Each structure stands twice: as C-alpha cells, then as structure tokens.
Image (spheres, helix red, strand yellow):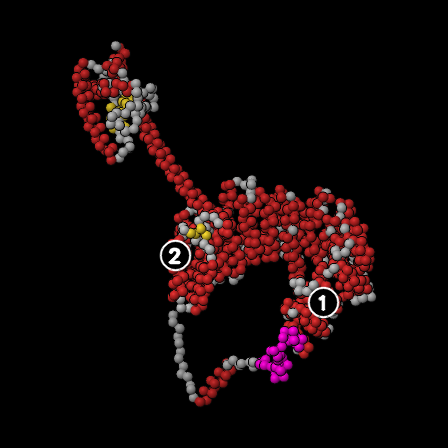
Amino acid sequence: MHPIIIFSKMDFSQSNLFGYIEDLQELTIIERPVRRSLKTPEEIERLTVDEELSDIERAVYLLSSGQDIQGTSVVANLPVLMRQNPAETLRRVLPKIREVLHVAGVEMQLTAAVSFLTVLQEELVSIHTYSHSFLHIILQNLEHRDAGVSNAWLETLLAVIEALPKETVRHEILNPLVSKAQLSQTLQSRLVSCKIMGKLANKFEARIVKRDILPLVKSLCQDAEYEVRTCMCRQLEHIAQGIGAELTKTVVLPELVELARDESSSVHLAAFETLVNLLDMFDADDRSQTVLPLVKSFCEKAFKADEAILVSLSFNLGKLCNGLYGIFTPEQHLRFFEFYKKLSTLGLQQENGQNDNQVQVQTLEQENKYILVRKNCAYNFPAMIVFVDPKNFHLELYSIFFCLCHDPEVPVRYTMALSFYEVAKLLNSGVYTIHKELVTLLQDESLEVLDALIGNLPEILELMTNGGENRGSENKLLSIPDLITALTTAEQRAATSLKWRTHEKLLQKYACLPHIISSDQIYYRFLHRMLTIILTNNVLPVQKAAARTLCVYLRYNPKQEQRHEVIQKLIEQLGQGKSYWNRLRFLDTCEFIMELFSKSFFCKYFFLPVLELTHDPVANVRMKLCYLLPKVKSTLRIPTDKHLLQQLELCIRKLLCQEKDKDVLTIVKRTVLELDRMEISVDAFQKRFYENDLLDQEKDRQEHLLLEMEQLEKEKQQNEGRSTNINNKIFEKKRRDSKTSSVLAKRITLSVPGSSSATSAGKEDKKSKLVRSQSFSTQALHPKYNALDKCPNISSATGYTCSVSGMGKNCMLSFTDDSFQTHSGGNSGNTAFPSSSSCNLYNSADQKSSGNKEIQTRKVNLKSRKSNSLRSSDGKKGNQKVVEAAFWCDKVGAAEGLSNAWNE
C-alpha cells in the first residue's frame, strides 16, 4: 500500500504571511550574549611590564606591584632564576617571596612549597646556604591554617631533614619541637610534631632518641585528641626502626597494646596496622603472648564493628598469616584460612540455602566496602598460597582463585590480573591448573583487566608453556590452541577500543611469542595480523609496535619460503604502496630490520628498495629517508658491498642535484656531511667496530643456523618419504607373494583324487596334463640350469636371473633383473629344483619325444621373451622385469605319478 499524500494550497496573503513570520521567529535560536573578557585600559596598564627589564628586576617588580597570578608565576619560576643568577635571586627575589607569603593565597603557598623542594632536590645551592635562606621560610609556614598548605610545607620539611646535617636539625628543628608538642599548643602544631618525630627517630642515635624524643612520644600517645593519638600511633613504626628491637619491646609494644584497646576505632585500627608492620621485630614469645590475642580480638570484632576494620584486616591478612605462621596451631591455621575464604566472597549473594527475604539489602557504601574487601583478598592471594602451601592449591585455594577471577566487579579482577604472575611463579609445576583463568582474564570485557595482565604477559606465557614439569606433553599441546584464540581475541578487542596505549602495549608484549609457540602458529595467526595493523591502523605508536613485532616474528621464522613471502609483501605493500603513509612505515620497519637482523640480511633484501624512495614524489618520505641514510650506510662492508656503496653515492648525488624542496635539500646537505665523516667497516675485524662486529656476527650466525635447520628438516622429510616409498614397495611385493601362496593352497585343498570309474575322455585329459607336467620337469633339468642347485643367486651375462619354485607338482618359473629368489607356498618344504631321478619317475618312452619337442619350443619362447625384456630394460634401467610361466598339474595326475614312483 502507498501512503495517500494530500496537497493543500498554501495561502500567501498578507495576513497569513505575517503569521508565518511569527512562527519562524518562535523557532529561531536566540543567541546568548557573549561575555567579552576584554581588560579595561587601567587593567592593561597595571599588567604591562617594561620589556627592557632583566629577569631579576621583572620578578621583583611583579612580586611588589603585580597581581597574585603574576606573583605565583614568579614563585614557580624560582628554580630557573636560581640556575641563571643564584646570588641575585637570593639577595633580591627570595626576601620579596618571604614577604608575599605572609598574605599569599593557597595557590601561591602550594607553588612555593614545590619550588623550594625543587631547589633542594636539584642542589642549586649548597646545603648550608639552603638552611640559612630557605629553612626559616619553611618553618614559618608550617602551621598554616589551611591543612593542605600545612601538609605541603611539612612534606618539604621532611625531605629537608634528610639532607641537613645533624647539628642543624638539632638546633633548628628538634629543640623547638619540645615546646611545639605540648598540650598547650594547637591541634595542628601537635599533629605536625608527631610526623616530625617519626622522621627524627631515624636521624639520630638510639640514645638521643631515648633521651629527647621518647618522652614526647609517650606524651602524645596519651593526648586528649584522638587525631593526635592516631597520628602518633602510625609514627611508632618509624620510631621502632630507629631505636631497635630492645627498646621497641620495652617501650613501643606496651604503648601499642594500650592504644589497641582505645575507645576510638581509628586509634585501635592504627594500632593494629602498626602491630602487623612490626611483626618482624617481635620474638616468638611476644607474638604468641601479646600479638596473637590482639589479632584474635580484631578478627572477632571485624564483622560486628565498623567496616573500616574489616577492610584493614583483609588488606593485612596475608602479612599477618605469614608473620604468625610459626606459632599457629593446626586449629588456628584452619581458622584463619576459613576467615580468608569468608572474606573472599563477602558481599556476593549465596544461591544455596537463601532466598530473597534472607538476603539483606546492602547500602551503596557497604557494597563499596565489600568490593574493597574482596579486592584486598585478591591482593593477598599470593601470600595465602605460601600460607597454605602450593602443593595444596588445587584442593584448598583453586575454588577461591576461580571466584576472584570471575568476580562481577572490575577492581577485583584487575587486582587478580596484577597478581597473576606471582601466582604462576608460586605454583611452578602446577601452573597448568590456572590456564583456564588466564584465558578468562585475556578475554575479560574490561580493558583495564587486560592492561593489568599484559604487564607480565611474556613471563606468564613462558611459565604456562614451559613451567609445568609434571605436565604431559599431550595436555600441553592441547592447551595451546585455547591460549592462541584468547590472545587473538584480546588483540582484536584492544584494536576496536579507543585505548590505543593498551593496544600498543599488547603488541609490544606479543613479541615474546616466538619463544612460546611454533613458527607456523605465529605465521598463520599473528604475523599477517601485524601486517594488517601496519596498513590499516591510524595510530602511529600502534603501527610502530606492530612493525617491530612483525620483524621479531620474521627474525625467528625458520622457513625461508615464508620469510621471502613476508619480505615481498613488505616491499610491495609498504615500500611501493600507493599511500605515502605506508612508505613512511616501510622506513620505520627498515629501522627495526637493521636493529634485529644482520647487516648482510638488510643489504640483501632491503638496501635497494630503501634507495628507491629517493625518487618518492612526497617530500616527507624523502626527508625521512635522508635521516635514515647514515644507518643505511653503516650496514655496508667493504669490499663485499662496494656496488651498494656506489648505488648509495649515486642516489645522494641525484638528491643534491634534483631536489627542489628547500627543507629536504637542507637535510640532504646535513646528511652528506654526516656520511662523509662516517667510517665504513671492512670485512675483517677492527678494534673500533669490535663490539658491533661481534654482535653482527652473532646475528649472522643465528640466521645461517635457521637456514641449516630448515635444510636438515627438508632432508629429513625427503628421507622419510624415501623410506616410506621403499616400505610401500616391500609391502606390495609381500602382498603379491602371499596372494600367490594363498591361491596355491586353495588349489591344493580343492583338488580331488582320480577313480577307476572315470571316463576315457577324463583319462585323456589327465594324460595331457601329466605330459605338460613332465615336459616342464624335463625343461627344468636343462643343462643350462644344472649349476643353480649349487649357486642359487647367479646373474647371467644379460643381467637376468631365474628362479624356479615347486610345490608337489605345482611349479612356477620367474625371471628377474636383480636377483634369483625362491618362492614357496604355504605348505611347501624345502624349495629346490627337481632332480633328474625324480623327473624320470614321471617319464615314459612315448612321452619323452613329445617332451623334447615341447622343451625346444619353450626354449625358443624364453629366448624371445628374454630379448624383449632386455630391450625394454634399456629405457627403464633397474626396473624389475618378471616373466613368469606357471604350469599347473591336476591332483589326479600327481597322485598317479607318485604311486608309479612308489611301485618302482
């Protein structure tokens, strides 16, 4: 059906026309007024600075009468001024900065803290000058009312303390610290004092710390404000490292035990984390009698108290379990392991035994904390493998590992991807058990997970393919196809995303594959994909990464045919491509070729195609080629590559004479000067090129080794093919012989003995068969073959041999080119020519005459056949020519002959 279109006549009268105009005005987009940010003449005058002023004068002027943004710019530029003119900067600029900072805003304060730290780190002035000029400014702004500014100056001060001499620290920092840490001081002052004491504990000897700092530490641990107690508790770790194990046991541990029982959750959380970090400093008694009970109490409170304790416990559980491993009983060991299993699935709905009413509704904040707990469990998974023992991984930990790798939240899977390499190292020979999880993470829907996994991808793949000592080769080979599919899928997903850095990183890591999988798998699944990326991708770093990886694949490909095919495609599709972008990538690829291959390889395949680009119509291609020419020349050896050197010089002359682009011509002239200064290496070793020559010789040796391996492989295949053909011929010959023997046996079993009631016609038939048998026996005893009984293998003058085999009355005569062989039936005994006596048993007087006639006839036939076979053997020398004549005797005749012989 077609829609019915109704045309109505539009009225363009004056009244209706105004109506249309009003409608159009309603549809028009009303432009918003653009706010012009033009400065007034007064503002322009105030911001204008005389151009003739020096940098120091301009800085002083801007700090004195400029706006805040100009003053902030001067403070940020302080390290540059210190490099240019340190004396004038210290004399004129730094005092002005000190004055301005009293009234400066937050932005200038933060900028000043960073600039002061940069001056210290770059050592632009001596430490004595720094402590005299900068330290007082840092200490004055340390207690700024803004917490962010105060922390920025504090970080600068803590860095300065490490560089200052001890005496300066004692007089300028430690002595004023005693008054700053008193309860009468502000909260900010006491918090700063806590952090400074943690830094000073590692600056002085233990006796000075014990005398001057520990009393202040005990006082701040008992402070009325929980923020101060928390801050001091976190600094006890640094103080313990400064005073040693003895004082830690007598002074720090009691304070930690008391703080662990604090009413504030943040205080006892800080005490728990400090205890875990100091486990190595406690002996076995302290761990079992003091630390372990505290840890148990924390685990009991974990699910009842604030979730922050649960998060901290999940983060430190791996360190805690391994730190207390020696004092755990089997029950405690199992209890902590079950606790970890419970944390690893926290927040996930259990399908077994629960319904919708039983599942508690989780708030968003709780859900985020549960995700953080599972993420911490993934972080601690390698530590739990050590705790449980890698031998028990499959029974105890594999289910947890599976759940964490398939967790619905990206942060959990991301952490598992980061720790995957550590897990693989710990499993060692049992690494094949986590192959499926590797495939799962490679095919993860989140590229963040893939990015985390590919950081150690070469090491992981090497462990996967070579690390399983107890793994059967069959299982190993079966697992590789899944792995290859996962790798190709991961690359395709990265290619279709907008995260080109992940794609670039992945392609760089894929350069390890020649050490992991076979060259054929690389050739058919990865190498052509790299070439496609070079040709089609639009991101330059990705193209370069693909080009280098392709060169690595080419470097380790042992099949010369495949290598030539790839080289031909590189030259045709890149070097001679229609797009100038492809020709630029060809030059990038040639750089990687020169890096990875020997000089002779580059000269053989890529030297002349590179020089052809001197005639490229695009100036950028010629320009890039000019930059590459010094490297190209370094691949030459004299006198072997003298003709290539002449080609290079000819191309340079053409560029100098014919180049019309000014930029290219400038680079050509610069390149010519550089090429003239270069020294070309000769075939013999020289001292100045010794290391490079050795490296190139090793590359060349490896390339020749690949060619030799390919040649050996071809010879092996040819030998296997020949042996297969010989075996087939032998098998066919045996098959024919066995078939002949089976036919003989069948004739014997099916024969029937004669009777006295046979007809006269039957008797005549029997007599004729007996005559043929006797004539054959007479022929077999011809004097020409009398010596065969003694020498069974004798070649005649014509190269022919003959063999006669008989079984009862059945006889077969065969002539061959090569050897004289005896063919026997299945039930025959010793195969031999019949003797004259045995033949005479079958002869009669009237049969002799007819037999002699037959012998003469057969001798003529044999001679004619022999001459024919000789003529045919001239065309196909060595082929076996067989002429067989078989005469079968009926069993009745055979039985009559035997009975006559017996009677005689």
- Callout 2, which amino acid? Gln
**Which quarter of the rendered picture does the N terminus lie within?**
bottom left
What stretch of residues is rendered in magenta?
35-62
Q: With respect to residue 501, does 717 lie above or below?
A: above
Query: In percent of the image, x 74 and y 53: which residue is there?
Result: 241
| In the foreground, 702 or 269 | 702
x and y percent of residue 102 in the render?
A: 73, 73
Farthest top residue in view: 904
Q: With respect to residue 394, does 745 lie above or below?
A: above
Residue 801 visible to an observer of this rendering: yes
| In the foreground, 590 or 412 | 590
Q: Which mark is drawn over residue 134?
A: 1
Q: Earlier in the sequence, mark 1 or mark 2?
A: 1
Q: Which mark is drawn over residue 336?
A: none
| In the foreground, 731 or 768 | 731
Q: Secondary structure at mark 1?
A: loop
Q: Secondary structure at mark 2?
A: helix
Query: In percent of the image, x 80 and y 64: which residue is there?
Result: 176
Image quadrant in which you'd find residue 791: top left
Indicate yes or no whether the magenta region holds residue 631.
Answer: no
Q: Is residue 831 left or right of residue 21?
A: left
Indicate yes or no whether the magenta region holds residue 36.
Answer: yes
- Callout 1, which amino acid? Phe
Q: Residues within 10 Å of mark 2 (few under 14, many from 20)?
A: few
Q: With respect to residue 11, does 552 lie above or below?
A: above
Residue wearing tag 2: 646
Q: Residues within 10 Å of mark 1 (few under 14, many from 20)?
A: some
x and y percent of residue 487 in the render?
A: 50, 52
